[in-house]
Amino acid sequence: MTTNPSLQLWLYDTTLRDGTQREGLSVSIEDKLRIAHKLDQLGIPFIEGGWPGANPKDVQFFWELQENPLKQAEVVPFCSTRRPHAIAADEPMLQAILAAGTRWVTIFGKSWDLHVTAGLKTSLEENLAMIGDTIEYLRSQGRRVIYDAEHWFDGYKQNPDYALQTLTAAMTSGAEWLVLCDTNGGTLPHEVTQIVKDVVTEIGNRELLTGNEEKALTQSPITNHQFPITKIGIHTHNDSEMAVANALAAVMAGATMVQGTINGYGERCGNANLCSLIPNLQLKLGYSCIGEHQLNQLTEASRFVSEVVNLAPDEHAPFVGRSAFAHKGGIHVSAVERNPLTYEHIQPELVGNQRRIVISEQSGLSNVLAKARTCGIELDKDHPQARQILQRMKELESQGYQFEAAEASFILLMYEALGRREQFFEVKGFQVHCDLVEVKETTNSLATVKVAVNGKNILEVAEGNGPVAALDAALRKALVNFYPQIADFELTDYKVRILNGHTGTAAKTRALVESGNGQQRWTTVGVSTNILEASYQAVVEGLEYGLLLHFQAEKALKV
Amino acid sequence: MTTNPSLQLWLYDTTLRDGTQREGLSVSIEDKLRIAHKLDQLGIPFIEGGWPGANPKDVQFFWELQENPLKQAEVVPFCSTRRPHAIAADEPMLQAILAAGTRWVTIFGKSWDLHVTAGLKTSLEENLAMIGDTIEYLRSQGRRVIYDAEHWFDGYKQNPDYALQTLTAAMTSGAEWLVLCDTNGGTLPHEVTQIVKDVVTEIGNRELLTGNEEKALTQSPITNHQFPITKIGIHTHNDSEMAVANALAAVMAGATMVQGTINGYGERCGNANLCSLIPNLQLKLGYSCIGEHQLNQLTEASRFVSEVVNLAPDEHAPFVGRSAFAHKGGIHVSAVERNPLTYEHIQPELVGNQRRIVISEQSGLSNVLAKARTCGIELDKDHPQARQILQRMKELESQGYQFEAAEASFILLMYEALGRREQFFEVKGFQVHCDLVEVKETTNSLATVKVAVNGKNILEVAEGNGPVAALDAALRKALVNFYPQIADFELTDYKVRILNGHTGTAAKTRALVESGNGQQRWTTVGVSTNILEASYQAVVEGLEYGLLLHFQAEKALKV
């Protein structure tokens, strides 16, 4: 679907404010600046940077941005309305957001009568005055104002008339956007649709009543629904797994600002995930949010943010996850290669992601061939070794090996079947010795390995703070004189899973080892009833595959 | 909201079939059986167990269930329609699902003309015959049939007339449920609403046309929408982050079967998450799915399944995640303590979850007290040891220990702080020796342990087919003469997780060991950079806790 520029939406990112409320996420000022610049590149027009009145780190963030401003985006500070019976101009919190030096500010206020009387312990009238005064004061200081109506949906369900009075207070005092917040995340899409439609009608009517005829209603070209010129926004949370669906429902009912966070980070179950919202709105509903050349940076932006905040990316995330366009079953693979439309809801390239063929227990010959192709090996399905590779793979998988995550081991297996596996070294055996005496702190591991290179046996020994670390160290010591590039290899990840846990400690163990050489990363697998042997197998194949990559690159250079 | 029994929905779990398509998830037959029994307890009426025609492991799963059947649930095998121009009775795949010996079977067929002509490479008429023949044959063998209409929504959008013909073929040949599948996960809720309404109207009309007046239409008491007696189901995928929203939309448009998986496991971005669907349907919309006493097992069931498949639980999952009802300091906390409604969309206890106050020391203490109470230890918050327990627990958790799953270790810690931990034996040290020489098959592990009982040192040695098995055997040999009941203890589960994976093999390891004595089971935890030491700690505490249970029971008998 091509986008229609008349269906313009305004995205508002709150990763740097609401997103940082996620349990386990913490960011430095430097992290926040890097993310802000990335969001700017991505074409997000509004970036909420923090609450400078509540958080000294956020004060500095806005100062730094004044030194080194964003190219396009409006960066916005966030703050509550003035306190009950205080004077807006005297509120230090409001002075702090003025000092942020931005064109726009966001003010949140109470919509739900219960929160006014039980939370703020003030009168319903005073709350309306708090909203009105605060916005008027900020307008008098030259700021444009976005008003976040906290607990909007719960408040409206309890007392619609009062809730609408709070919006009117914000609107008549000069807020340009009224953002309806599902703060507790409990609202369902059919309720959002109905309530946003109600607001659109009511606010339009109130603009007529207050004499703002020229501001009154306009008509949406897609929903045929009337909505007011004072614009409506939506801010949703994911407590019912509805954040993205609720935001879409609100847009289709007339909202034109959408608030969310990258990767859906946020308090409790998170905020609306912009990485899902943007492609749904733009590719499926034809709204215009960001440029096409920006949309195809979405996957990279998602991973960039997860790197900066140091959280593992969600591999199964819609649109941007590593598995979002991964195909496992045999039938799927042959069909998707003939016509991607058959098993893919969008072209992965549109969001900067890519199709992946996964090798697994269920895979058929076509998976193996497709995988071989992505590894640069052209194999025909009638090639005598093709079935043999599949056979061997299934045999190993029934023993507990798993090649989905261990592509490097699969490539070595293919080379072996094709008679092309080079023997850089031969494993002769190992011994590991662990000692814990009297006090825990003194555990030591000692590993001895015996390997052969070019027919020459090498015996080496090393220590480590665990048996696998000791084995790894001994292997490297044994091989580095023959293959100096091994000094650049490193073990970057190590995972262990016990198969058939119910047989207790005698169960089989699968170890996955991720290795790297500075430029590339690869994963290998080992399986055994002995956890050390499983780990050892994976470490050995990790070294072998690294050498394979090195010599392939060297050959390619010579040609 | 109280549930209305007239709004009955039928849940259909496909964790064991579609769920296992998730990349990185693999399960043994034993794992599948444990999950099936858990789903049965949870009150799920239909449990899809696998595709016995395509996967030999699934054949055995159904055999095992015949030996050891579920209490309530119908277990269902899954299969495609017969191949083009084949005879249903001659299809080995259909024989395989008959051999599964179930009352119900699920058959999937093609709804989308493109998949028939480009995928199956057969005619549109032949596809209708494939659907009809297959279902008729299974009906003739006494099976009740659920029909999954693959790619329903994409197919209907392209060629609604043909798509409806496929449903009619299934209905007239005897399928009792027609399940509309959003196989590629690309459909949005407003489309689902419209298309399900169309189907309900059309299928009702077709039943009238075919003379099934008595099967024609009935009326939904909540949506006032007419729907047919041949029942409609919904099966959604999460590629647009809409799986749960789409399933809700379908139910509100007249679907009465909802398919999904625990934790939303499934291919690519997953299936509809039953852990979110069930509470949304039951607590918010008043549908009846499972019993109240089952609903409050939902959090436990979610964590049980993630443990069995050995995937880290999603802490931010709606309803069942550890952070789903977590409140970070300040305003939220005091408000939520005064009135939970202000910041919680449902009562966490309804789904078996709990409120957590993050960072607050005071609330940490109340957690400890609550935990102590569930372990039968009454502790007052002014008890001098209460804060000490909290302190020690936080210290250990920051090192990587985790007591949620390891209650037995937590109880030992509390007894220790209260000066009530009995020293049945004292660990002096261990040595482990592993050997792999020339050929893989000959790995052997030898463990030596030194323990003291009543001041007497015992040195023992044992072999095993892995180092942890050898350690376990040596410990038992050393202790069994003093504590003969140890002969009845068994290690029932053993799991290992590497913490901070990115530091490679030098990373910390957490081992969880589940032990049993025939009547009870308990779990203990150990953490170390040395995988063997972490395992050893957990094995040792497992034996200690078993002895504690034994002597407590003995004392209770004497009193």
Image (tube, coloured by chain):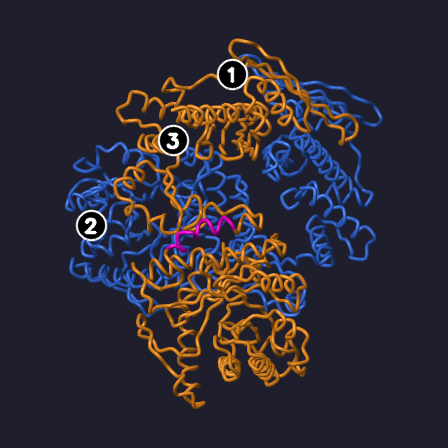
Chain colours: A orange, B blue
Whether labels 2 and 3 share one chain? no
Q: Magenta residues, as a range?
A: A293-304
Circle 2 SS class: helix
Q: Chain of mark 1?
A: A
The CA span between labels 2 and 3 is 44 Å
Determine if the magenta segment contains residue A302: yes
Q: Nearer the viewer, residue B171 or A23?
A: A23
Identify the mark nearer the N-term, 1 or 3: 3
Q: Is residue A119 visible?
A: no
Left or right: residue B380 compared with residue A347: right
CB under 8 Å between discs 2 and 3: no
Circle 1 SS class: loop
Read off the residue under disc 2: B169
The residue drawn where x is 17% and y is 41% is: B122
Q: Disc 1 marks which amino acid?
A: Phe
Q: Chain of mark 3?
A: A
Location of residue B95 in the rendering, given as x and y in whole percent from the top left corner: 28, 34
Magenta stretch: helix, strand or loop mostly: helix
Q: Nearer the viewer, residue A199 or A300?
A: A300
The residue drawn where x is 62% and y is 39% is: B499
Location of residue A448 in the rendering, given as x and y in whole percent from the top left corner: 64, 17
**Mark 3 nearby-residue class (10 Å; few <14, some 14–19, many ≥20):** few
The CA span between labels 1 and 2 is 62 Å
The residue drawn where x is 71% and y is 55% is: B364
Left or right: residue A540 compared with residue A51: left
Left or right: residue B545 compared with residue B147: right
Q: For residue A425, which numbered disc appears in the image?
A: 1
Circle 3 SS class: loop
Q: Nearer the viewer, mark 1 or mark 2?
A: 1
- Please say if B515 is above or below B196: above
Location of residue B419 in the rendering, given as x and y in whole percent from the top left corner: 83, 43
